[in-house]
Amino acid sequence: MLNLNKYQEMQKSTKILVCPLDWGLGHASRDIPIICKLLDAGFDVIIAACGDTVNFLKLEFPELVVINLPGYKIRYSKRNFQIIKMLALIPKIISHTYKEHYLLKEIIEKYAIDIVIADNRFGLWNNRTYNIFITHQLKVKFPGFLRLLEPIYKGISGFFIRRFDECWIPDYMSENNLSGELSHSKIKLDNCYYIGPLSRFMKDAKNEVNEDIDILFVLSGPEPQRSIFENKIIDQVNDKGLKIILVRGTTKKINKMPKIVVLDVANTKILSDLLVRAKMVICRSGYTSIMDLYLLKKKTVLVPTPGQTEQEYLAQYLSQKNIFYSITQKEFTLDMATQNVFNFPEISKEKNEVLEQRIINLKKKYCSS
């Protein structure tokens, strides 16, 4: 990590603070291509994060300043009642949103920030900076009778998103989209731009690469559900006689498993290589993973986090489109997954240059002499 003195010695230029949400590594992962494009455009990028997100982004950008910004520290329920748990956490979430809003003021003053990019962190906007919000969820899916709360969330999220100058949605605007109702509902916000799917991996990965990995597991997300799924995997893979690699998405200790290869955290280069070599991938139905695997055209089985309505909706939505096979964590067996995985359909990808144009506009606004 660079210290403040070294940072102050750097040539003065427009400074952008990028702040991913700390619920798993998905938000940080999808911000990587944005950070790369910002660096290519000549901006000074500073990262504000915490926990495993910090370790992950340090692997990707060891030369950048990384500021510790406390996250929400959300833990999921051990059972399938995530939405109930989240409702109970609303006071804590609101409190932290206001807390991070005031912490941002200190960071802006200390590091002379010009632009703030907040990935699903509603409190990170300031009147002294140009503010950009990233989300694929203009709408949150509530289960059962709790759907009555959806208009309330719509009002609250709309209130915060309007505090930002721009809202970037990582998906296509057309029907050929990956997020369905989550970002293509009737909600209309004037500051929204559909910037296309984001992936930290090369879109033109070579098809002729030898697929020598039978199954690649990629885990992520808040505890304890990450560990529950990990333990279920471990119980099933030992006697399969397959080449299996498990990327855990955490640095927490685990017992050695001689039958499979285990990596705690994989940087972009390593994970890109593993994904290209994998015959099939099994992972959560987090939106970032979906974008990565869609752009790489990988055979994939999605296992949504129990009770997380967003992941459950995305898994069902993409399964109905015959893009990815999905199965619940409770019903998951390795045999069922390997027998039902879909062949990736031929889907024409739309050309989307909205992200590049938004960055060009930022450069014109802040870097013109």
Image: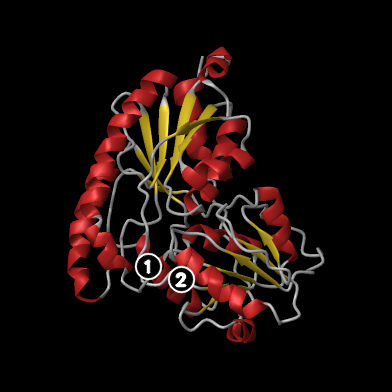
Residue 369 is situated, as x and y percent measured from the top left of the image, at 51, 14
Q: Residue at x 81, y 63 (%)?
A: 209
The answer for how far apart the CA atoms under marks 1 and 2 are is 7 Å
Residue 73 is situated, as x and y percent measured from the top left of the image, at 37, 49
**Which image quarter: residue 147?**
bottom left
**Which image quarter: residue 56?**
top right
Compare residues 321 and 57 and report the one nearer the observer.
Answer: 57
User: Left or right: 20 with respect to 215?
Assistant: left
Question: Eyeballing the image, is 9 above or below 99?
Answer: above
Task: Identify the mark at residue 308; answer none if there is no mark.
Answer: 1
Compare residues 13 and 187 and report the one nearer the observer.
Answer: 13
Task: Identify the mark at residue 329; answer none if there is no mark.
Answer: none
Q: Amino acid at mark 2?
A: Pro
Q: Residue at x 28, y 60 (%)?
A: 86
Question: Eyeballing the image, is 337 above or below 3?
Answer: below
Q: Secondary structure at mark 2?
A: loop
Compare residues 55 and 278 and report the one nearer the observer.
Answer: 55
Asked if residue 298 shows in the view, the reply is yes
Q: Residue at x 63, y 74 (%)?
A: 344
Q: Amino acid at mark 1?
A: Gln
Q: Are marks 1 and 2 in contact (CB under 8 Å)?
A: yes
Q: Residues within 10 Å of mark 1 (few under 14, many from 20)?
A: many
**Which image quarter: residue 167?**
top left
Residue to which mark 2 is pinned: 304
Residue 238 is situated, as x and y percent measured from the top left of the image, at 68, 77
Q: How many marks?
A: 2
Q: Secondary structure at mark 1?
A: loop
